[in-house]
Image (cartoon, grey):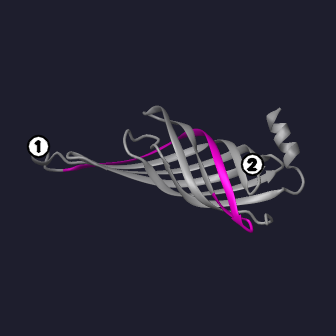
Amino acid sequence: MIALALLAALTGAPDGLRLEGGVFGALPASLETGQVLGPSLTALWTRDILSLGLRARLGTVDEDATNHEVHHTELRFAALAGLRQRIGRGELGLDLSAGAVIVREDRLIHLAARYPNPERTEGWRTGPQIALDASVRLFVIEGWGLAIEGGPSLAFMPDVALRVGWSGGISVVYAPGDG
């Protein structure tokens, strides 16, 4: 029923396109420590209070301990559906996103004197993810603005199980047609 309501609301010419580019931070999908940081790109199509969109994020984190090093890279793709409320020159939003996270880890285990030959392992993992993000956008001048968003996220990775975390970001927003 919600999908039909979204489809009905988004038929015809959209009220607006939002293009967002910025940086994000999140807990890693499979690494126990650290914070994934990197660029984020989002495209949203809005009509009235409803919106649909796509998001791509690429983040990395490194862990360096006395006996190992890990380089962790995540590529996150998601489709978004949400609600928007314009308030003056601002906009409040709530987005539910679902997609996939692709993780590449490169591990180097070096135990110095006990194990003179370091062991390197590389691996790929893919799993589903969902997130619920609240957002605030402030349009400063002729369709340009800033956005801050964040909220809880879930990712399921093979051999890691369910990871509960958070993600958030700050972006520059371009909204052609908003003046």
Report the quarter where the N terminus lies: top right
**Which numbered marker is on residue 45?**
none
Q: In this view, does 95 lie to the left or right of 125?
A: right
Q: Residue 177: percent from the left, percent from the top?
A: 80, 65
Is 15 located above or below residue 6 in the figure? below
Q: Which of the two residues, 179 or 175, is positioned nearer the viewer here? A: 179
**If you read the primary sequence from the N terminus, does the residue marked by circle 2 or circle 1 appear first?**
2
Residue sitting at 60 percent across and 39 percent down? 131
Local secondary structure at mark 1? helix
Q: Is residue 145 magenta?
A: yes
Above or below, comparing residue 130 to residue 139 in the picture: above
**Residue occupying image coordinates x 84% and y 56%:** 14
Q: Magenta segment range?
A: 118-146
Q: Residue at x 47, y 41 (%)?
A: 29
How far across and how far down the image is residue 102, in percent? 51, 47
For disc 2, the marked residue is 52
Q: Which residue lies furthest to the left in this view?
A: 113
Residue type at mark 2: give it: Leu
What residue is shown with label 1? 114
Against 161, residue 131 (above or below) is below
Q: On screen, 17 above or below 26?
A: below
